[in-house]
């Protein structure tokens, strides 16, 4: 079956072929390399695409929600009342991010609860977001104990459990039977409870080599390499798991003998504990697949250094690459890293291109307009 036939409603059921930690036990967070076995699927993808995984909720959280509601897992619920409530809570609906319908129902049913005290009123969005920060559906149910639901009504207040998208970290030219992913396992404590990312803890704690993983490809659209014969240089900026598509890019460039120069910026916490794919990237540097490799390890010195600092440090050379027509690719955190990188590019254009702040901003915008500034941020 061709890869394009697989969708959220009709996913391919893959398995994990191999996995290993990209971080040492001393790293502040665990990041894992997964190889998803796609044999027999006919799935095809291009460097820059993502693999969407359909996860399941934590069974312990499902059990706690059922206990709080006073409902049994076998109670009919879900669409047309055909699916047991426990199964619906496990695999169909989101119980980590409370939606508006649930909040309105709780406010109506429990006049003494926090949501009944004006948090849902117009103009109170900032206060509402502050209240919701770090809270899930179980927290809200416990803080509104007077609320009562039957199974179908409760499920109807919840949003869908959506697939999670991960940038593919491999090229079919190098690994024709699998899709590689680099995933940071999300764990934290909030409001006195240990919590974790829905998909990342599902993979890390409850998925083994025999577990079917519903998945499908989502196209990266503009996040594409130049043609192998195109000598356009590329700048790749990918701290943390943002490195994933650039591993795929470099594998593809090696396989196709791509002509343009390539420069990679990678950042993490420690060189010794979190230098993802070090041997592979340094091998590309030695073989000429990669012309430059600059790293930023934030905790290896007293003053934290991030990828934007390395960009500024090499600003004169970055400017020369931009003037040569380089395409800039950025992958990773949208809220902070991507903003910092954008500001660094403007500073480089101003300082080394002799532009005013306004002209530098216009230059960077022109890169974007010309599809020379491409982002895969989340």
Image: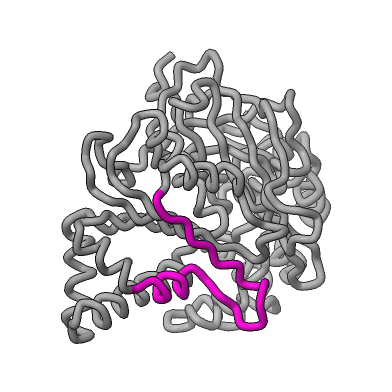
Q: In the rendering, at what x and y percent does residue 199 appear?
A: 64, 46
Q: In the rendering, at what x and y percent does residue 158 appear?
A: 58, 52
Left or right: 57, with 288 as reference point: right
Reply above or below: 32 against 267.
above
Nearer to the camera, 233 or 114: 233
Left or right: 289, with 295 as reference point: left
Nearer to the camera, 113 or 97: 97
- Asked if one can make out residue 141 in the rendered structure from this viewpoint, the answer is yes
Left or right: 207, with 254 as reference point: right
**How many marks overall?**
0
Q: In the rendering, at what x and y percent does residue 163 appear?
A: 53, 42
Q: Quadrant of residue 226?
A: top left
Q: Is residue 348 magenta?
A: no
Q: Quadrant of residue 19?
A: top right
- Asked if one can make out residue 148 in the rendered structure from this viewpoint, the answer is no
Reply above or below: 286 against 69.
above
Write the start and end of the magenta stretch as one range.
291-315
Judged from this view, the residue extending furthest toward the bottom is 356
Reply above or below: 372 against 251.
below
Residue positioned 35% across, 56% down in the render: 235
Q: Is residue 314 magenta?
A: yes
Q: In the rendering, at what x and y percent does residue 221 appear?
A: 30, 42
Nearer to the camera, 35 or 137: 35
């Amino acid at each position: 079956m061709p890869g394009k036939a697989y969708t959220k409603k009709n996913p391919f059921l893959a398995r994990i072929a191999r996995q290993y930690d990209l971080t040492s036990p001393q790293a502040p967070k665990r990041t894992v390399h997964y190889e998803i076995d796609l044999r027999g699927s006919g799935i095809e993808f291009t460097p820059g695409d993502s693999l969407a995984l359909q996860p399941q909720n934590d069974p312990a959280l499902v059990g706690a929600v059922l206990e709080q509601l006073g409902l049994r897992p076998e109670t009919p619920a879900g669409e047309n009342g055909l699916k047991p409530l426990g199964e619906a809570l496990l695999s169909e609906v989101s119980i980590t991010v409370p939606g508006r319908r649930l909040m309105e129902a709780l406010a109506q049913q429990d006049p003494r609860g926090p949501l009944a005290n004006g948090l849902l009123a117009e103009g109170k969005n900032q206060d509402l977001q502050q209240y919701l920060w770090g809270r899930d559906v179980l927290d809200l149910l416990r803080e509104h104990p007077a609320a009562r639901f039957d199974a179908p009504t409760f499920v109807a207040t919840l949003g869908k459990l959506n697939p999670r998208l991960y940038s593919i970290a491999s090229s079919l030219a190098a690994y024709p039977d699998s899709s590689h992913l680099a995933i940071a396992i999300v764990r934290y404590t909030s409001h006195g409870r240990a919590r974790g990312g829905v998909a990342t803890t599902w993979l890390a704690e409850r998925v083994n080599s025999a577990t079917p993983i519903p998945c499908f490809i989502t196209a990266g659209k503009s996040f594409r390499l130049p043609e192998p014969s195109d000598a356009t240089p590329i700048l790749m900026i990918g701290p943390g798991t943002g490195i994933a598509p650039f591993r795929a890019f470099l594998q593809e460039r090696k396989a196709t003998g791509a002509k343009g120069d390539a420069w990679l910026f990678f950042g993490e916490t420690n060189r010794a504990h979190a230098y993802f794919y070090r041997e592979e990237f340094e091998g590309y540097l030695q073989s000429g697949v990669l012309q430059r490799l600059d790293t930023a390890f934030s905790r290896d010195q007293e003053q934290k250094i991030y990828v934007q600092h390395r960009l500024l440090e090499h600003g004169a050379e970055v400017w020369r690459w931009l003037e040569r027509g380089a395409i800039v690719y950025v992958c990773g955190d949208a809220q902070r890293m991507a903003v910092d990188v954008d500001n660094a590019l403007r500073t480089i254009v101003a300082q080394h291109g002799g532009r005013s702040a306004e002209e530098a901003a216009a230059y960077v915008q022109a890169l974007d307009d010309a599809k020379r500034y491409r982002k895969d941020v989340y």
